[in-house]
Image (spheres, helix red, strand yellow):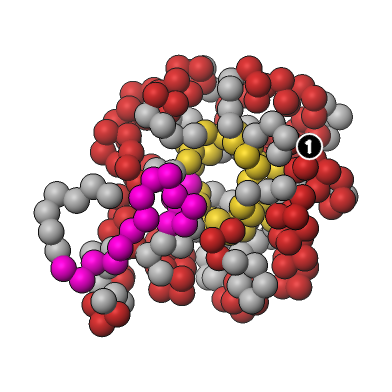
Amino acid sequence: MYNNFSISKVPSRTSKPRSAGFTMVMDKGLSTRDVEDMIEVCGEYIDIVKLGWATSYVSQNLSKKLEVYKANGIPVYLGGTLLEAFIIRNAFDEYLKIVDKYKLTFAEVSDGSIDLDHDEKCKLISRLSQHVTVLSEVGSKDVQKIIPPYKWIELMQKELDAGAWKVIGEAREGGNVGLFRSSGEVRSGLVEEILTKIPSERIIWEAPQRDQQVWFIKLLGANVNLGNISPNEIIPLETLRLGLRSDTFDFFLNKL
């Protein structure tokens, strides 16, 4: 990890390539210059980038931007909603052609916007995992659809068994569905029950809001996997992980 100077009693962070302490960043339409600037400032803390939902379809700089990420060793994948748009049009093979065209090494399988039989979803995960590393997302984008904890566990386990590298806990870019109540409050009982069956290192928790990030860091430590992090929150999140922001300032001092 990159540190400008030494401070004692700071949590140890994993180094890239990481499987724990993972930060997934949400790119909702950054320019190529934005990407270059972001990487200059905090590239060491970015493990993977998601081009949010279907923004890749309308981004004029897609090829150039992907080249910048690739040159800096940062993998990129297309938002799960884009795949859903292909699935609902019975065009999964066309999606595979896009993955091949842009030489992507990761892909996301989700069903947050469509009704997809879960066995069919697992088949798609299995098939896609023969081409790329698969992240599968569990949870609905519909705020009215509440999935009970036992079902989250069942879905996550089946998707991991089908070939997903990690499962993603749905929160949307706003952090107000799925793992969270509409207020943004963590459904803590849900998370804690999931963790009784699914190893934390196999889960990426979407947590775009600072209070959510703090909650997960205090529950699972500096090396919890967090996702849907906006570009301007990458450095602030890293300071939270290290106990160098007020929200986690005292948390690690007596533990190290």
| Of the pair 9 and 139, the residue shown nearer to us | 9
Q: Position of residue 113 (x, y in %)?
A: 74, 46
Query: Magenta segment: does it hold 114?
Result: no
Q: Residue at x 53, y 70 (%)?
A: 185
* Residue with the most extreme bottom position: 254
Residue 22 painted magenta? yes
Magenta segment: 8-24
Q: Residue at x 61, y 72 (%)?
A: 195
Q: Is residue 46 left or right of residue 187?
A: left
Q: Kindly give the residue lying farthest to the left in the view shown.
A: 5
What is the magenta segment's predominant secondary structure?
loop
**Callout 1: SS:** helix
Q: Measured along the vertical axis of the image, is residue 159 above or below residue 100?
A: below
Taking the spot 28% from the left edge, 49% from the top edge, the residue there is 1
Q: Which residue is mark 1?
A: 127
* Residue type, numbered disc 1: Arg
